[in-house]
Image (cartoon, rainbow, N blue to C red):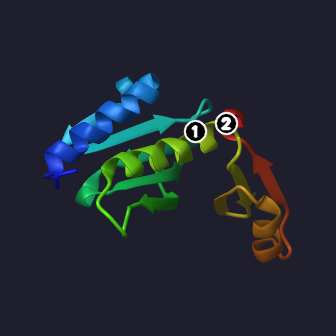
């Protein structure tokens, strides 16, 4: 695939995400050719966000106070394949929505993991961990 500029990249990702997640339509905005989607959880306790800033897909979550507690980048570093990058983003978002990735609440920290027991062992020394799926928040 040819290298895309910021607008072309954002348009490509927007089209792909909206095909898979039409619910995002009401939660997207374009600013300076950068796509941002801010999708609240059912209870508005957490907001899932996606951006195309710097020609890469970044997925993150903010708490109800707007503080980012986690984010990750989806970037194909070995080759320039935007289709694979989009597929990886869709897969990651699906894993959040279908509960494969669990939100682990420990004190004032929140983690996203498909292996919450590992997170609990590492971070919940004297605190109680609460596990929730996206659909529960």
Left or right placement of residue 43 versus residue 30 in this view = right
Check disc 1 and report the residue beneath it.
94
Viewer-side residue, 66 vs 69: 69
**Which residue is drawn at the image coordinates 48% and 41% (left, top)?**
90
Mark 1 burial class by Cα count in 10 Å: few <14, some 14-19, many 20+: some
Image position, residue 36 (x, y; %): 32, 43
- Residue 123: quarter of image: bottom right
Q: Is residue 99 visible in the rendered structure shown here?
A: yes
* Residue 60: mark in rendering: none
Viewer-side residue, 94 vs 124: 94
Mark 2 burial class by Cα count in 10 Å: few <14, some 14-19, many 20+: few
Image position, residue 121 (x, y; %): 83, 73
**Which residue is drawn at the image coordinates 51% and 51% (left, top)?**
61
| Callouts 2 and 1 close, C-beta under 8 Å | yes
Image position, residue 73 (x, y; %): 43, 61
Viewer-side residue, 10 vs 81: 81
- Residue 54: quarter of image: bottom left
Under circle 2, the secondary element is loop
Under circle 1, the secondary element is helix
Q: Is residue 102 above or below residue 74?
A: above
Viewer-side residue, 17 vs 108: 17
Check disc 2 and report the residue beneath it.
98
Q: Is residue 128 above or below residue 90?
A: below
Q: Is residue 33 visible in the rendered structure shown here?
A: no
Q: Is residue 104 above or below residue 134?
A: below
The CA span between labels 2 and 1 is: 6 Å
Image position, residue 81 (x, y; %): 32, 54
**Which residue is drawn at the image coordinates 39% and 45% (left, top)?**
86
């Amino acid at each position: 695939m040819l290298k895309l500029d910021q607008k072309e990249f954002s348009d490509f990702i927007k089209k792909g995400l909206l095909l898979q997640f039409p619910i995002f339509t009401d939660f997207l905005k374009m600013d300076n050719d950068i796509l941002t989607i801010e999708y609240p959880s059912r209870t508005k306790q957490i907001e899932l966000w996606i951006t195309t800033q710097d020609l890469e897909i970044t997925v993150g979550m903010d708490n109800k106070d707007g503080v980012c507690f986690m984010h990750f980048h989806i970037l194909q570093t070995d080759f320039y394949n935007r289709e694979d990058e989009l597929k990886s983003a869709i897969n990651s978002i699906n894993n959040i929505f279908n509960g494969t990735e669990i939100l682990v609440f420990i004190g004032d920290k929140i983690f996203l993991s498909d292996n919450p027991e590992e997170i609990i062992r590492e971070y919940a020394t004297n605190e109680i961990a609460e596990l929730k799926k996206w659909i529960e928040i």
